[in-house]
Amino acid sequence: MVRRLVRQPELMIEVGKSQTEDIVTQIKSIGIDLGKTTFHLVALGMRSQVVVRKKFSRQQLLWYTANLPSSLIGMEACVGAHFLGRALREQGHEVRLMPAQFVRPFVKRT
């Protein structure tokens, strides 16, 4: 995969252009929850506050992350995570895969 720097309007955050660029520059780390067809992305800023929370398909996620500055991305290690991890590394991101046994304590359910 080649890193694409083309912005697609339907993948941009629904705020003004200057606000979108400010939000994108604030992103320091990203967490991705993998599913079969949809992926949930949560981006954290410098002070660990949630900056972006979005839902994507696989192709949309790759387009969106190609337009982000290099950052740390954490995912649960599973079959699909290895493909996605390689694609994100080619885009210049640092990817860390976590075993499921260590992800489980972070789930907040009652």
Image (spheres, rainbow, N blue to C red):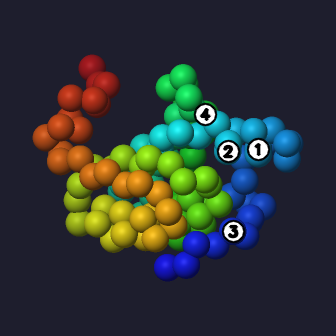
* Image depth: mark 3 or mark 4 in front: 3
Q: How many marks?
A: 4
Question: Which residue was labeled with disc 2?
Answer: 24
The amino acid type of the residue labelled 3 equals Leu
The amino acid type of the residue labelled 2 equals Val
Between 43 and 36, the residue placed more toward the observer is: 43
In this view, the residue farthest toward the left is 101
* Crowd rating for badge 1 (residues with CA inside 10 Å; few <14, some 14–19, many 20+): some
State the image coordinates of residue 58 (x, y, percent, origin top left).
Answer: 48, 66
Q: Earlier in the sequence, mark 2 or mark 4?
A: 2
Secondary element type, mark 2? helix
The amino acid type of the residue labelled 4 equals Val
Secondary element type, mark 3? loop
Q: Earlier in the sequence, mark 4 or mark 1?
A: 1
Secondary element type, mark 4? strand
State the image coordinates of residue 53 (x, y, percent, origin top left).
Answer: 56, 40
Which quarter of the figure is the C terminus placed in?
top left
Secondary element type, mark 1? helix
> Which residue corresponds to the image point at 50% horizontal and 49% vertical from the top-left?
71
Determine which of the numbered discs, if any, sits on residue 51 in the image: 4
Whether the residues at callouts 3 and 2 have beta carbons within 8 Å, the answer is no
The amino acid type of the residue labelled 1 equals Thr
* Image depth: mark 2 or mark 4 in front: 2
> Which residue corresponds to the image point at 47% horizontal and 44% vertical from the top-left?
30
State the image coordinates of residue 73 (x, y, percent, origin top left).
Answer: 42, 49
* Crowd rating for badge 4 (residues with CA inside 10 Å; few <14, some 14–19, many 20+): some
> Can you see residue 60?
no
Q: Earlier in the sequence, mark 1 or mark 3?
A: 3
Q: Is residue 39 above or below residue 66?
A: above
* Image depth: mark 1 or mark 3 in front: 3
Question: Which residue was labeled with disc 3?
Answer: 5
> Can you see residue 98?
yes
